[in-house]
Amino acid sequence: MPLFQRKKPPPTEKPPPPSEELPDDDDTQNKSKNHKKPSGGKAKWSCVDSCCWFIGCVCLTWWFLLFLYNAMPASFPQYVTEAITGPLPDPPGVKLKKEGLKAKHPVVFIPGIVTGGLELWEGKQCADGLFRKRLWGGTFGEVYKRPLCWVEHMSLDNETGLDPAGIRIRAVSGLVAADYFAPGYFVWAVLIANLAHIGYEEKNMYMAAYDWRLSFQNTEVRDQTLSRMKSNIELMVSTNGGKKAVIVPHSMGVLYFLHFMKWVEAPAPLGGGGGPDWCAKHIKAVMNIGGPFLGVPKAVAGLFSAEAKDVAVARAIAPGFLDTDIFRLQTLQHVMRMTRTWDSTMSMIPKGGDTIWGGLDWAPEKGHICSGKKKSSNKTRGEAGENSVSKTKPVNYGRIISFGKDVAEAPPSEIENIDFRGAVKGQSIPNNTCRDVWTEYHDMGIGGIKAIAEYKVYTADAVIDLLHYVAPKMMARGAAHFSYGIADDLDDPKYEHHRHWSNPLETKLPNAPEMEIYSLYGVGIPTERSYIYKLNQSPDSCIPFHIFTSAHEEDEESCLKAGVYNVDGDETVPVLSAGFMCAKAWRGKTRFNPSGIKTYIREYNHSPPANLLEGRGTQSGAHVDIMGNFALIEDIMRVATGGNGSDLGHDQVHSGIFEWSERIDLKL
């Protein structure tokens, strides 16, 4: 202790002016010991107080907004929207009711992949209390409460593609199966509500729900879904005065109904035994919404690396969560293990090979501009494709997967491929902790993984071999149910097998000359077409390939964004896949359409909502949001009330689909 201490000033005296010299350590200690908070001073504000205050404000604001939401008139949002944007047009149902149109033909809805609800009928102990509760669709609350249990129950048997032992999940039945995907997120609800305005109800509307995880033929083997669809269509036709049904499939439901049209006329036991004229007797029109007739490149990325553009961008923003799994969730590994048991995902692998999708140095969409500017004119067939010559560097869309941006842009003569097919697979990958979530990459070894990257470029033909190499068990199951080629001779008996029925390039349309087929889809949105990949050598990663998000070009007209080359489409299905069959392969009498069924293309140019009060918009062309597009709903309703393609104005085309289709030679 110091020998002397300074004397404290009396309480009434003012403290001396602060000195510029710093106090010594002893003075500091004495002041801290003798300091006392004045009795009338304010309490110190702690971090706990701040958190409580913040939570209280959030809760108070939430309850206040909830009160306003329940107290305001139902017409208030519409009133505000009209005050901003002007009077809103009548919904299609109200408009057609004023025109005097009424329900006529029964309507059948066929949902696509993931949009239909699934509920639990039998489960493991971890799923106690969830009997007949939705595990897919609704609030998804069980995903957060017990994620590993949810993944286990949503997965199918990796050998059979059917139910695992002790687990039964089934499709929700009725219109509620897919009217809303989640609370407030409509799928079929807007179309159903508009049809109700002109007299439709459950007796003349039917949701053909099915377990979208299964292969199409297995939905009949396990659940007899195809038989029930056949019976319900027959019942609706007979109880509606013999008026044929209008079928409205969406997304993968388009492929499912293609399979059904072959199944229903094929002889038992593999088919429904309806006879060669069943479709002609029962179907007026098939109005396909966003149909991936020829598959989608997005399916390749999902099966290859459990990602697409959105997931790849999320990884780039927060690599710790998805790559190193700092929370030990192993998110993408669980997603890959689960989705690779869903045989339905393999139905959307690109079909037609290089003939349809292009090769190393060509693609049907060559020269497409990716500026994203809205096209103002409605082009006819002769005008389609005009102004589609890009001034930027050409894109090699035929290279669906390229390892490196330089490879994606290199001339074909400069690409040296080392064939991966003969590479010897090892026993493990570098990170042994990946064994916790098994994927087929575990069986490849470092040599097999490097061989894939050294092959450098994969076109549509090579992609099939690639998936067989990296996921042999999955593709072995898929090969029993799906095929991806082009038939040379459609009369060959081998094409009578059900694995060809959902491939429009390997089967004929039914003999139903009075039936009509429509392709209804959105355009004007950048849609994934091909990818730039990189080999991920991080010891923390269990999936060795990632989309190379750093491959990017800032040019507005560039099609390359975050490692993905985009083309025109509805954000999920490229125009080529949605439109080619109706634009060329089925148009007129062809070997794929021997009875000359009339086909029409109706494209809807995407227009985003003008403000938040419009929700997802009434002019959207996005893959799911288009289900609320007023123009599309009106087209469907006019056909359901007795109209045909002529009443709709024949084709409505904004893209280059006719020009692109002419570049494909199928020797029709």
Image (cartoon, rainbow, N blue to C red):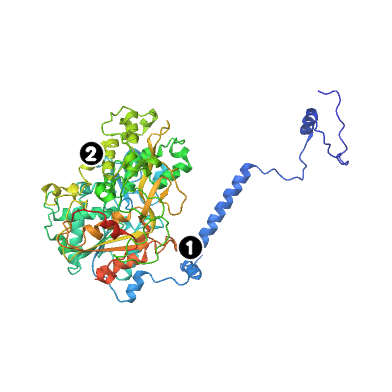
* Residue in front for this viewpoint, 340 or 231: 340
Of the residues shown, which amino acid type is indicated by label 2?
Ala
Residue 240 vertical placement versus 113 (above, below): below
Location of residue 342 (image quadrant): top left
Residue 105: image location, x then y, percent:
23, 68
- Determine whether the residue tagged by mark 1 lies in a helix, strand or loop: loop
Disc 2 packing (10 Å; few <14; some 14–19; many ≥20): few
Locate residue 254 relative to residue 23 in the image: left or right.
Answer: left
Locate residue 498 relative to residue 361 in the image: left or right.
Answer: left
Residue 378 vertical placement versus 160 (above, below): below
Residue position for label 1:
611
Inter-mark Cα distance, 1 to 2: 48 Å
Q: Does the rendering let one see residue 134? A: no
Location of residue 389 (image quadrant): bottom left
Residue 577: image location, x then y, percent:
29, 54
Residue 392: image location, x then y, percent:
41, 52
Residue drawn at 38 percent across, 48 percent down: 565
Residue 106: image location, x then y, percent:
24, 65
Residue 127 vertical placement versus 582 (above, below): above
- Determine whether the residue tagged by mark 2 lies in a helix, strand or loop: helix
1 or 2: tag closer to the N-terminus: 2
Disc 1 packing (10 Å; few <14; some 14–19; many ≥20): few
Residue position for label 2:
476
* Residue in front for this viewpoint, 225 or 249: 249
The quadrant of the picture occupied by the N terminus is top right
The quadrant of the picture occupied by the C terminus is bottom left
Of the residues shown, which amino acid type is indicated by label 1?
Asn
